[in-house]
Structures are given as structure tokens and as C-alpha cells.
């Protein structure tokens, strides 16, 4: 396998983008990434999108988006793995370049979620339809089950869950592309509308429109471009049973641990070497469980780690410096690509007010459903 690098990034603002159709959002992000990389062509492209057929009644988007980007004729593939679609699109680009099939590949993600469809119903298609969705349980309910189990076993508190949201909004207030670029208080979270005990409205990521794209290339090509280079050290992917009840321990998300194990082995690193991470905080409890699965904190200690500041900017291991899905927004097909972009900007030293000083190695973790699929990437800034 050839060494692989990311040399260009681009994304739209995340939010309720009523004036921007899906094709325009993707094209904006892709053209920005191409310009950032300084390349004059792409050999192929991957598009992460969870449910364009449900959200905007448009399938066959790989061809549609290649056409609107002005590259009709190249291989273009849509990738779907629920909310992990974007991260998996990046992984497919990394594999293609690493295998020598192509030299320059665009990996993007896009979702248009606010045009009138019932987003909760559309998102529920990522759960087990016969055993979960048919009986009325939604993803807030599934993650509430995880939260209750974690609280019962480890003593995780309602206040610690709130502190995840507070931290990520603090970070998001520094991100001009975030859907909610403002701070919130613990009291605001605790008093927000109940969704599924113990999760309240401000524990939940929002419904979001947006697109993100990166340019993946070989190290040889990257060096010739003369742009900042971020090397892809590892790409780990794992799956699990779709239904939460098939998991032997609801306080864990095994696919995260397996994908991380693969990635750490590829990179020849341990969790202690990671200097910042973007993780899939679709709900506040998700960030807590994921940081345990990644080995950043001991099992049962994640709530304490957040409340003590270990995962804040300036802490031992800053998590979700972008604001995470919670504050930056969660256009499901684009979220995994946006995570990559945040880490690339951090490793380039171009993250502005949310910069992690001296960061050289970062990790992204993107998952689908209640953890039935997961992609973990480890990146290193080299120039």
C-alpha cells in the first residue's frame, strides 16, 4: 500500500440551509476542497449520503453530483452506512489511493434534512425496523437506554451528561461554520425539554443541512503540490449487530473498540499518543461511551473526565474542538468528512481560536445508528 495524504478540504456552513439544494451544497464543498488542494483534476470520487431518497426524494446522486461538479465521466460512487457514511467515503478514497488505483480522489459527504420530510422517521431507518422502529423506539430512546445503563453501572450523573453539551457548545462558539456557534449553561441543558429520560433536547444533536469534502492523494503527489500535507496513518472499520438488544453490554459500543484497535495497530500507536479527537456525539452519552471505547479514559470515568476539563481545549485530550455534532451540526452523510476536516485544520495549525497548540496527531471516530458501524481514522501533520 502507498502512503496516503489529505491535501485539500472544503465544507459549507452547517445549519438550516433553505436556499441551498443538495447538489449546490456538495458542489460548493467539493470545489473549495479542489481549490485548497491546488489540483487540476480528480480521478474518481466517493459521496457519503445516508438517505437522500427519503430526505429529498433523490437517488442516483453519485452521477448527479459528478455531473454538477463538472466531472461527469469519472468513476463516482455513493457510500451508505447510516451516520457513518461520510467517514466510510473517506476510507474508500484512502483504500483506492493506497492501492494505486487512482492518484487523486475526492471524498465528500452531504445531507439535506430540512425540506419537510419527517427527519425522525427517516433516521429511524438506520435502526432495526422489525425489532426497534416498528415498536416505536427512536434513536433518542435507544441512546437513553445506553445512558440509563451507564448511569446505573458507573454512577454517571445527569450533570456530567450536561457538561458534554456545555463543552461542545463552548468549542462550537469558536467555529464560524457551526450550526449553533454559541455557549450554553449546565442549567439550560438540565431544564431543556425532556426527550427520553435522561436525555433532554440539549443532549441531542440537531437536524442539519450541509456538505463537506476532502482531497485524498498519494504522498508522492502531495509533495509535488507544495501544500500542507496531513498523512493518513490508519483507517479502521468495524460493524456490529443492528439492534441494540443484541449487544451483550449496553454500556459499550463494541464496533468502536474494534475499529479503534485496527487503526491503532495500523498506525503503531496507543491512545496516549493522540493529541485531539473528533468523535460521534450524536447524543451526549455517545461521547462518553466512545471516549471509553477509544481508550482515552477508563470505563466509567468518562463523565468525570468531561466535568474535570480533561476533554476540553487546553485539557489532556481535547475532544470535539469543532463543537462536535452537538454544536457544529449533524448533516448525517457529511458529519464524518467534517470530522476529518477539523482534524486536518488542527494539524495544519489553521484552526484559529480553537487551535490545539502543537498538535501533530489526531483521530476521528464516526459511527452509524446505535453503533452498528464505525470508522476510525488517525492522521498526522507532516508539513
Image: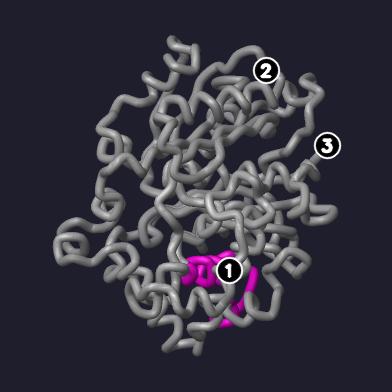
Question: Of discs 1 and 2, which sits in the foreground?
Answer: 1
How many residues crowd mark 1 within 10 Å: few (<14), some (14–19), many (20+)? some
The residue under label 2 is 39
Q: Secondary structure at mark 3?
A: loop
Q: Residue at x 72, y 21 (%)?
A: 221
Q: Is residue 15 magenta?
A: no
Quarter containing the N terminus: top right
- Quadrant of residue 130 in the image? bottom left
Are the residues flagged by discs 2 and 3 in contact, CB closer than 8 Å?
Answer: no
Q: Nearer the viewer, mark 1 or mark 3?
A: 1
Name which residue lies at 40% across and 35% down.
79
Residue drawn at (70%, 58%), measured in percent from left and top?
Answer: 276
Q: Position of residue 40 (x, y in %)?
A: 65, 12
The verdict on residue 300 being magenta is yes
Crowding at dot 2, Cα within 10 Å, few <14 / some 14-19 / many 20+, comes out as some
Query: In the figure, 154 relative to 205: above or below?
Result: below
Q: Height in image: 152 above or below 54?
A: below
Rounded to the nearest angstrom, the CA distance separating label 1 from label 2 is 41 Å
State the CA–CA distance, disc 2 to disc 3. 18 Å
Q: Secondary structure at mark 1?
A: loop
Q: Which residues are magenta?
A: 284-302
Mark 1 vs mark 3, CA separation in Å:
36 Å
Q: Secondary structure at mark 2?
A: loop
Nearer-N-terminus badge (1/2):
2
Image coordinates for residue 175, horizontal then vertical, percent: 65, 50
Label annotation for residue 184: 1
Q: Which residue is mark 3?
A: 383
Q: Position of residue 282 (x, y in %)?
A: 45, 60
Q: Residue at x 37, y 19 (%)?
A: 63
Amino acid at each position: 500500500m502507498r502512503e496516503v495524504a489529505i491535501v485539500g478540504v472544503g465544507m459549507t456552513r452547517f445549519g438550516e440551509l433553505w436556499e441551498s439544494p443538495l447538489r449546490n451544497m456538495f458542489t460548493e464543498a467539493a470545489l473549495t476542497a479542489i481549490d485548497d488542494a491546488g489540483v487540476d483534476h480528480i480521478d474518481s470520487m466517493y459521496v457519503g449520503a445516508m438517505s437522500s431518497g427519503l430526505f429529498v426524494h433523490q437517488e442516483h446522486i453519485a452521477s448527479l453530483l459528478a455531473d454538477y461538479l463538472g466531472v461527469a465521466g469519472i468513476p463516482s460512487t455513493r457510500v451508505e452506512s447510516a451516520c457513518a457514511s461520510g467517514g466510510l467515503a473517506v476510507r474508500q478514497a484512502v483504500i483506492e489511493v493506497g492501492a494505486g488505483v487512482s492518484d487523486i480522489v475526492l471524498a465528500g459527504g452531504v445531507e439535506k434534512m430540512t425540506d419537510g420530510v419527517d427527519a425522525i422517521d427517516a433516521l429511524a431507518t438506520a435502526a432495526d425496523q422489525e425489532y426497534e422502529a416498528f415498536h416505536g423506539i427512536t434513536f433518542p430512546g435507544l441512546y437513553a437506554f445506553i445512558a440509563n445503563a451507564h448511569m446505573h453501572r458507573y454512577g454517571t450523573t445527569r450533570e456530567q451528561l450536561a457538561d458534554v453539551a456545555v463543552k461542545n457548545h463552548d468549542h462550537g462558539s469558536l467555529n464560524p461554520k457551526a450550526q449553533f456557534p454559541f455557549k450554553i449553561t449546565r442549567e439550560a441543558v438540565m431544564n431543556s425539554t425532556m426527550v427520553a429520560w435522561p436525555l433532554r433536547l440539549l443532549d441531542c444533536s440537531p437536524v442539519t443541512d450541509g456538505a463537506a469534502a476532502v482531497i485524498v492523494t498519494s504522498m508522492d503527489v502531495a509533495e509535488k503540490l507544495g501544500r500542507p500535507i496531513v498523512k493518513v496513518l490508519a483507517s479502521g472499520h468495524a460493524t456490529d449487530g443492528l439492534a441494540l438488544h443484541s449487544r451483550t453490554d449496553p454500556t459499550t459500543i463494541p464496533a468502536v473498540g474494534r475499529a479503534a484497535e485496527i487503526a491503532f495497530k495500523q498506525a503503531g500507536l496507543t491512545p496516549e499518543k493522540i493529541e485531539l479527537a473528533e468523535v460521534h456525539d450524536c447524543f451526549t452519552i455517545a461521547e462518553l461511551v466512545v471516549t471509553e471505547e477509544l481508550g482515552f479514559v477508563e470505563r466509567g470515568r468518562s463523565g468525570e473526565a468531561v466535568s474535570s476539563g480533561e476533554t476540553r481545549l487546553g485539557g489532556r485530550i481535547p475532544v470535539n474542538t469543532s463543537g462536535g455534532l452537538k454544536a457544529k451540526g449533524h448533516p448525517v452523510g457529511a458529519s464524518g468528512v467534517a470530522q476529518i476536516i477539523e482534524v486536518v485544520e488542527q494539524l495544519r495549525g489553521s484552526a484559529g481560536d480553537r487551535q490545539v497548540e502543537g498538535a501533530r496527531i489526531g483521530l476521528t471516530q464516526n459511527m452509524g445508528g446505535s453503533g452498528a458501524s464505525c470508522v476510525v481514522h488517525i492522521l498526522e501533520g507532516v508539513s
